[in-house]
Amino acid sequence: MVSIYIMRGLPGAGKSTWARENYPQAHVCSADNYFLDEEGVYRFDRALISEAHASCLRGFAEILASIASDPANFPEAVIVDNTAIKAWEISPYYNLARAYGHDPRIVHVKCDAGAAHSRNIHGVPLERVEKMDDSLASEELPVFWTVEIVEGGCC
């Protein structure tokens, strides 16, 4: 069975790096992909963030449906690579994975806000990263979710 990982952490924490290093052949779903142009250049537009996340969730649902119809033709892992600060941001992915019979794992990549800010490639201001860090620390996820905490290499 295909493993499902839902990444969680600050921009610049090392979520994408963890995914690449641990599952180089994984199928990755990310809202960031919505902002890549034909040449692979990232062009973020805050006005399109809702559309980007809707596109990411649709892509995740499509890949789960494809896996269900032909599981032999898929890599060993599917990774959702977004910040996923709040439980409500994780739950659609978690619930879809469960509906398709998977046991998703949440991978929380821990990282100091200042270090994450210095490494994030999306230009998220330090003040926003710090607020996200506060939310990560205070947000309680359901106890029945499997959460693995890993160091992001910037702590």
Image (tube, rainbow, N blue to C red):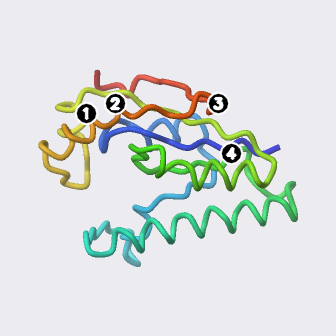
* Mark 1 residue crowding within 10 angstroms, few (<14) / some (14–19) / many (20+): few
Question: Distance of mark 1 from mark 3, alpha carbons?
Answer: 23 Å
Label 2, secondary structure: give it: helix
Which dot marks residue 77? Answer: 4
First reached walking from the N terminus: tag 4 or tag 1: 4
Question: Distance of mark 4 from mark 3, alpha carbons?
Answer: 21 Å
First reached walking from the N terminus: tag 4 or tag 3: 4
The residue nearer to you, when weighing 2 against 140, is 140
Residue drawn at x 76%, y 45% as measured from the top left: 102
Which dot marks residue 38? Answer: none
Mark 2 highlights which residue? 138
Tell whether label 3 touches label 2 (CB within 8 Å): no
The residue nearer to you, when weighing 25 against 88, is 88
149, above or below 129, in the image: above
Which dot marks residue 144? Answer: 3
The amino acid pointed to by label 2 is Ser
